[in-house]
Image (tube, rainbow, N blue to C red):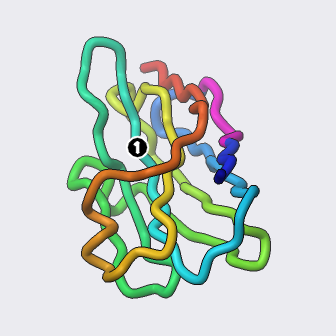
């Protein structure tokens, strides 16, 4: 069983920055799809960004492209999301998620198997 723990959320003013972290533990894997998702109250969950651990693919939602950067530290089993130029519409609960040992990089676009508990990001205008 994979255990994902997010941290780094908080409250910032518009234009500010936050860095989210996600640490994974529980099992080992050869490769993985790791992603960040978010859900605002009353809205559907949205895929923010994902990456394949082997560097085969990286995705950003159009709403965050150019402002957010996803990265990983495989040695630490850690995933990060650097969020710059934050906007009030970025306010949401942010979740880390994973798919272990995906068959292809395209698997990263499918449903994720493991989820963290989430970290709240609030951006005020």
Relative to residue 10, is residue 14 drawn left or right? left
Boundaries of the magenta span: 6-11
Identify the image quadrant of residue 66.
Answer: bottom left
Considering depth in this image, is 86 or 37 the residue closer to the camera?
37
Residue plotted at (51% across, 48% down):
114
User: Looking at the picture, does residue 120 appear above or below residue 3?
Assistant: above
**x, y percent for residue 107:** 29, 70
Relative to residue 107, is residue 75 drawn left or right? right
Identify the image quadrant of residue 43.
Answer: top left
Quadrant of the snapshot with the C terminus: top left
Residue plotted at (45% across, 39% down):
86
Q: Residue furthest front?
A: 1
Q: How many marks?
A: 1
Residue plotted at (62% across, 47% down):
20
Q: Which residue position is annotated with label 1?
A: 37
Relative to residue 124, is residue 11 drawn left or right? right
User: Looking at the picture, does residue 72 appear above or below residue 68?
Assistant: below
Give yes or no for residue 85 being in the magenta stretch.
Answer: no
Considering depth in this image, is 52 or 3 the residue closer to the camera?
3
Residue plotted at (40% across, 62% down):
50
Relative to residue 103, is residue 101 drawn left or right? right
Give yes or no for residue 7 being in the magenta stretch.
Answer: yes
User: Looking at the picture, does residue 124 appear above or below residue 97?
Assistant: above
Considering depth in this image, is 60 or 51 the residue closer to the camera?
51
Q: Residue furthest right?
A: 76
**x, y percent for residue 49:** 38, 57
Q: Give SS at disc 1.
A: strand
Q: Main secondary structure of the magenta part?
A: strand
Q: Say few, some or many: other residues with alpha carbon within 10 Å of mark 1 (under 14 / 14 to 19 / 20 or more).
A: some
**x, y percent for residue 46:** 29, 39
Considering depth in this image, is 78 or 31 the residue closer to the camera?
31
């Amino acid at each position: 069983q994979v255990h994902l723990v997010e941290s780094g959320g908080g409250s910032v003013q518009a234009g500010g920055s936050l860095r989210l972290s996600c640490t994974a533990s529980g099992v080992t894997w050869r490769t993985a799809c790791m992603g960040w998702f978010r859900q605002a109250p009353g809205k559907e969950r949205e895929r923010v960004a994902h990456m394949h651990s082997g560097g085969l693919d990286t995705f950003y939602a159009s709403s965050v492209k150019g402002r957010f950067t996803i990265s990983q530290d495989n040695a630490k089993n850690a995933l990060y999301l650097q969020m710059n130029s934050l906007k009030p519409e970025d306010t949401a609960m942010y979740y880390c998620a994973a798919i272990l040992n995906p068959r292809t990089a395209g698997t990263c676009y499918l449903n994720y198997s493991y989820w963290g508990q989430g970290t709240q990001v609030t951006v005020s205008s």
